[in-house]
Amino acid sequence: MSQASGWAAYYEKLRDRPPRRTLLAALDAFGETPADALAVDLGCGDGRDVVEILRRGWSVVAVDAEPEALRQLAARGLPGTITPIAGRMEDVPLPIGVQLVNSSFAMPLCEPEKFHALWERIREALPPGGRFSGQWYGPRDSWVGRPGMTFLTRDEAMALLDGFDIEMFEEEEADGVTPRGNSKHWHIFHIVVRKR
Ligand SMILES: C[S@@+](CC[C@H](N)C(=O)[O-])C[C@H]1O[C@@H](n2cnc3c(N)ncnc32)[C@H](O)[C@@H]1O
């Protein structure tokens, strides 16, 4: 199975799932939708979180490396302002004025060096009061060792979050099954932070 058809099966499987709770917590934490509310969703897939970002009145730049993800996002016919960008999050410039960077289960799919550079760009792009929501993976995740992926210890993750107020930092470790049906030990940090 090619990687692209693998992602197509993933989108199909998760199509009707609700938005991620990290995203919901970040949107709730803003309270009223800010003026000119602009979010970026890095590794947006077919739009599980984009649906909710738009529903709350935000505009969204939706980034995914897989054109199939953006095709399926477009096919949803969602009302609101979406700017789709097909590209790798490591390479895509972050828009001026972004107040929320969301990346659900996608940032660990960057190699470590690019992950750190991307995180610095996210930190710089967000204004004081801006938020990041998403997941990073820990060192006991069973995908450790896969090339091109980033895993962080709790201490490393906390160090990267220096300069942010932590609104959610939940560590999850559990045996489970991936959406594609493979056994997996998950070690996940669920993160919502606000730039000081
Ligand atoms: C596990 S899925 C998560 C999708 C969605 N965010 C969600 O929560 O359901 C990861 C997504 O990230 C995309 N992706 C993987 N590596 C990427 C990269 N370097 N840049 C942009 N998108 C990437 C994949 O194509 C896929 O759609």
Image (cartoon, helix red, strand yellow):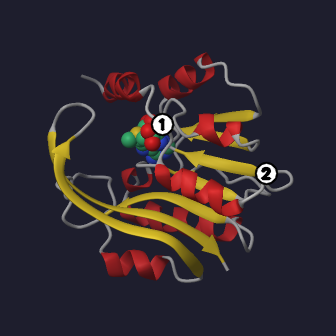
Would you place residue 23 above or below residue 113 in this image? above
Query: Residue placed at 70% from the left, 64% from the top?
Result: 125
User: How far from the left and from the top, in percent, is residue 107?
Assistant: 44, 54
Query: Residue placed at 19% from the left, 56% from the top?
Result: 174
Which residue appears farthest toward the right when viewing the image?
A: 35
| Kind of residue at disc 2 | Ala
- The mark that comes first in sequence, 2 or 1, is 1
* Secondary element type, mark 1: loop
* Secondary element type, mark 2: loop
Residue 90 appears in view: no
Query: Residue placed at 62% from the left, 71% from the top?
Result: 194
| Kind of residue at disc 1 | Pro
Ligand 1 shows up in the quarter that is top left
Locate residue 12 relative to residue 96 in the image: left or right: left
Q: Nearer the viewer, residue 155 or 96?
A: 155
Locate residue 9 relative to residue 26 in the image: left or right: left
**Marks 2 and 1 close (CB-CB < 8 Å):** no
Residue 123 appears in view: yes
What residue is shown with label 1? 18
Picture disc at residue 37 = 2
User: How far from the left and from the top, in percent, is residue 151?
Assistant: 30, 64
**Label 2 neighbour load within 10 Å: few <14, some 14-19, many 20+:** some
Based on the displayed image, in which of its 4 quarters is residue 74 positioned? top right
